[in-house]
Amino acid sequence: MTFLLDDNAGRIDSAQWVPSPNFGPRPETGDISLLVIHNISLPPGQFGTGCVPRFFCNELSADEHPYFEQIADLQVSSHLLIERTGAVIQFVDFRDRAWHAGRSSFDGRDNCNDYSIGIELEGTDTEPYTDAQYDALTAVTRTIMAAYPDVTSARITGHEHIAPGRKTDPGPAFDWPRYRQALVASSDDYAVTQGMTADNVSEPDSGLKELGMEKSDSEESVLDTTSADNTVADKRKSQ
């Protein structure tokens, strides 16, 4: 599986393009140096419903499901969604800032949305992800790393690692060694293989701090649909 990036559009060529209105400019143009893996399912624990794309496009109706009453007014997005079938949907141009990470910090730098790409996997913390999802995620990751060299193997992380204690996705069901080994096996690109050995393919360091403050700009809501047991979101109203 191979994906190409349209340099003029910041989009994966073969991904379905479903533009979300929930995005903004990056504070520093071209500052893309982190990849964050999430999970989501709507309703929680249900797959293939088509609700996630509508949620990211503000088209989810509160009366469709009791759970949606909590989230129908939220404004969130990710750059990509990888469905259980391996299908890839893109909602936000990589050059723009999607609203996926919320209060977060990586390697001492806050506000990960400013400099990250967010990928949602359709799933939960405890349900094994599919082979098709791992294949698509590996291929997409290779494309992103080739286009944005600052996204190195050491700068691929989970939502739970940039917001510990507040977020739990992609959870214990996500096989970090499998994913990282697949990146090594599927590419000779130094950006992918640097720092990755047989002893260095586990999940990212979970010791990153959780922010106790909210972002000063006011455009986003903070997504949390990682499992059926989790609170869906910490919403902050736009001004």
Image (cartoon, helix red, strand yellow):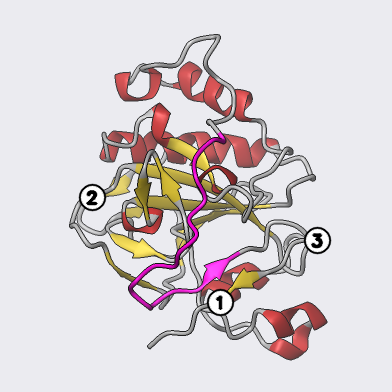
Q: Which residue is mark 3?
A: 229
Q: Please name the amino acid that badge 2 sits on.
A: Asp
Q: Which residue corresponds to mark 1?
A: 235
Mark pair 1, 2: CA separation: 26 Å
The image shows residue 146, relative to residue 101, as above or below, that is above
The numbered mark, 1 or 3, whose residue comes first in the sequence reads: 3
Q: Nearer the viewer, residue 141 or 18?
A: 141
Instruction: Provide residue 127's location: percent of width, then percent of height.
Output: 79, 45
Magenta span main SS: loop
Q: Position of residue 142 (x, y in %)?
A: 40, 33
* Kind of residue at disc 1: Lys
Q: Residue at x 23, y 50 (%)?
A: 31
Nearest the eye: 103 or 185: 103
Q: Amino acid at mark 3?
A: Asp
The image quarter in which residue 133 lies: top right
- Give the left or right position of residue 127, taking residue 200 as reference: right
What segment is highlighted magenta in the picture? 206-223
Which residue does the numbered mark 2 point to in the structure image? 31
